[in-house]
Amino acid sequence: MGTHTARFDYKLYMRRLYFIVLILLLGIADGCGGGKALKGIDQGTSGFPPLQSRNMIDRQAYSFYANGTIFEAMGEIAMANRQYAEALRFYPDSPEIRYAYAGTFFRLGDYRRVLKELESVRRRGVGHWLLLADSYRALGVNDSARAAYREAVTIDSNNVGAYHYLAAFYQQANQLDSAVWAYGNISRLSASFRVFQEIGNLQMRLNRLDEAKESYFQSIALDSSENNVRSYLGLSVIYEQSGNRVEAKRYLEMAGRLSPQNAMIQNRLLGYYEEDNELDKAIIVARNVIPLAPQDRNLVRRLGIIYYDADSLRLADSIFTLLLNQGDENILNYYYGGRTAFLKGDYDRARTDFRKVTAMADSVVDGWLNLGLVYQVQDSTDPEILSYRDGLQFMKNPDDSVRLLFVMAAALEKKGSFDSSVAVFESILKIRPEHSQSLNYLAYMLAERGVRLDYATELVQNALAIIPDNGAYIDSYGWILYKKGNFRGALEQMLRAYNYISNDATILEHLGDVYQALADSANARIFWKRALEIDPGNRAIKEKLEQ
């Protein structure tokens, strides 16, 4: 019932008609016989005690009452109100008339008058408390309204309407336990999927996840259609919070099938597919979501990134190019546009895009790393090193600085600037002594040159202490032993490395070198040949096989 609209109580109306019929019957009975005694009965000698006096029905009062009932049924509330007022003039102690009179004031919107009229009623039933509660509610006196509704359900625990009002009040007041109690009674009296869904929502807010799950199951059992998508979403959230991503995604997929036009659901499902690397499904969902929000360029860009991750470079490139042509200057368009161009071999465009990235976000390390990578594949070592130096001055995070220093040290080593490369690697180890990649790289560089081999041994052992099962680090250790002349020790380490990485040309070549040093030419040639199969352009291996 709305705040300012009274209910039409059919039962109350029929009860009032019953009173009218009763009045008529009483009138007829009173009029018949003209007050004469029945023949053969001596009224004065019956021997029975006299009857107690009764509050006799006033005919005029109930005539007005009957008229009021008829006017009220016709919707003429003001006229009904006047008739009830006249009835009360003749019969002021009638609770039935007083209640009817108060009800017309409610329907006329005079809620304070309702409260005044109800004060004099002593016989207070469910209808009295409901009208009192409705009036308090209309006046915004919520505490009194709640108390009246509670009185109503105390008298009649099956009054579903009162529980509805209580549930709404408790929710608004954030009294969630009481709201669950009210909805629980509603479900007992009038079970529906919406009621169990609401109970589940409240239990979720109370962090009673197991109870909420059961409520959602009950809701779905009553209605598993698109009308009940909220219950599927609730189950998805519960399973996600409990760490069961499989079930969380399954219920989210059910919700998505029931509501394919719900952008929120589809976006959440898209996130699951992206995280699980189910890119084919992600593409389908993304393409279906975009028409739901055609002005949302983020969705279009998201599809482009998924295409990129799925190696659909042509489609990815078309999306980023389209966005840039539309004037969308988002940095991700340039970053992924540059990555796509790089993978397609368009290095000039990639370089242009990555320069744009570094200009737009100079403290983001990925722009500088990718710009340097473009120069690297173009054998432009000096511009590569310069781009890393430029980027270092903008880095705010030590880990990002280490990433740039590492690739710069490798570029210096490739250029032949050995001492500079060593200095950069050692600067990294001052910042991050546990940086295993730098420990191994520097150790291997020193071993290749055959210098500072004890220092190199210390470095690689530190790297292995951090990652003991790294085949590349084990190979470096074996190579240092080889350079030291410990061929047996070197072979042991090389074979360990081979167990971890059996398809690396460098490890295979090293094994061949160690076997050759041990005068085992047959095994040496076996491993050199395997290395050449992996790296057929390696001249050094060819020369060894030709000897």
Image (tube, grey):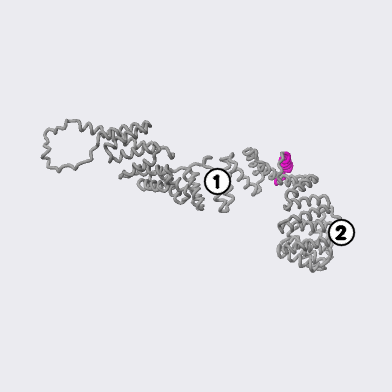
Residue tagged by mark 2?
544
Residue tagged by mark 1?
233
Start-end of magenta stretch = 309-325
Which percent across, then down, holds residue 288? Answer: 63, 39
Q: Would you place residue 454 above or below residue 389 in this image?
A: below
Residue 389, by quadrant, is bottom right
Residue 17, by quadrant, is top left
Secondary structure under the numbered disc 1 in the rendered image: helix
Residue 112 visible at all: yes
Secondary structure under the numbered disc 2 in the rendered image: helix
Q: Residue at x 78, y 50 (%)?
A: 371
Q: Would you place residue 477 above or below residue 159 in this image?
A: below
Left or right of residue 310: residue 256 = left
**The N terminus is located in which quarter?**
top left
Which percent across, then down, holds residue 19? Answer: 28, 35
Q: What amino acid type is highlighted by mark number 2? A: Lys
Give the distance between the C-alpha atoms of the residues marked 1 and 2, in whole angstroms: 66 Å
Tell which of 72 and 311 is nearer to you.
72
Q: Residue at x 24, y 37 (%)?
A: 57
Which percent across, then down, holds residue 347? Answer: 80, 46
Q: Residue at x 37, y 38 (%)?
A: 105
